[in-house]
Image (cartoon, rainbow, N blue to C red):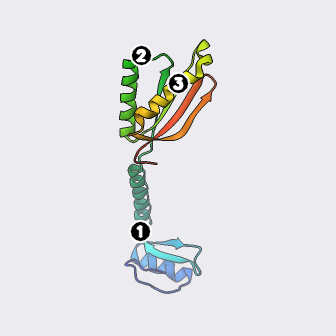
Amino acid sequence: MIGATGEQLGVMKLAPACQKAREAGLDLVLVAENATPPVCRIQDFGKLVYEQKKKLKDQKKNSAAQKTKEIKFRLHIDTNDYGVKIKHAKEFLADGNKLRVTLMFKGREMAHQEMGFELINRVIEDLKEDCVVDSPAKLFGKNIQISFNPKGNH
């Protein structure tokens, strides 16, 4: 058993341990139940719960969940539109987000999949300073998808 100020009180039965906790005006908290014998501590249980919640909240705040942003392209995209989409992609990656690029085919464009993969390779070339390819380009139905991770998080 551990006292309120952190001193060792030795091995005790439950009744005397509860009595000591009551005298101190605190709670008897089981700290390590798998230890032999189990370790208890005299402390304020409400304060313990509060500190655990606060610690969990801080951990969540520090590990901001990475979002996945998506940019969609079409096979016949104008150079200015392409430039704007690449600029947005670089901004997403700079913010620490993952990026998914989708190239959509429509109708007979499916007959020219090699042109689609050329466009995807151009995107990879334009973004290679800012990111790392997470998963290679794959054809899913009428779409080609590729995922990128920001450069610092691979």
> Secondary structure under badge 2?
loop
Determine whether 51 is above or below 4 in the image: above
Q: Is residue 70 visible?
A: no
> Secondary structure under badge 1?
loop
For marks 3 and 2, the one nearer the N-term is 2
Question: For this rendering, which residue is in front, 146 or 92?
Answer: 146
Tally of numbered discs: 3
Q: Is residue 139 visible?
A: yes
Q: CA distance from mark 3 to mark 2?
A: 14 Å
Which numbered disc covers residue 78? 2
Q: CA distance from mark 1 to mark 3?
A: 58 Å
In this view, the mark in front (1 or 2) = 2
For label 1, count other residues whose C-alpha is less than 10 Å away and answer few (under 14), some (14-19) or many (20+): some
Q: Looking at the image, which residue sits at the far bottom?
A: 10
> Secondary structure under badge 3?
strand
Q: CA distance from mark 1 to mark 2?
A: 66 Å
> Which x, y percent locates residue 131?
42, 40
Q: Quadrant of residue 52?
A: bottom left
Dot 2 amino acid type:
Asp
Residue beneath label 3, please? 103
Dot 3 amino acid type:
Leu
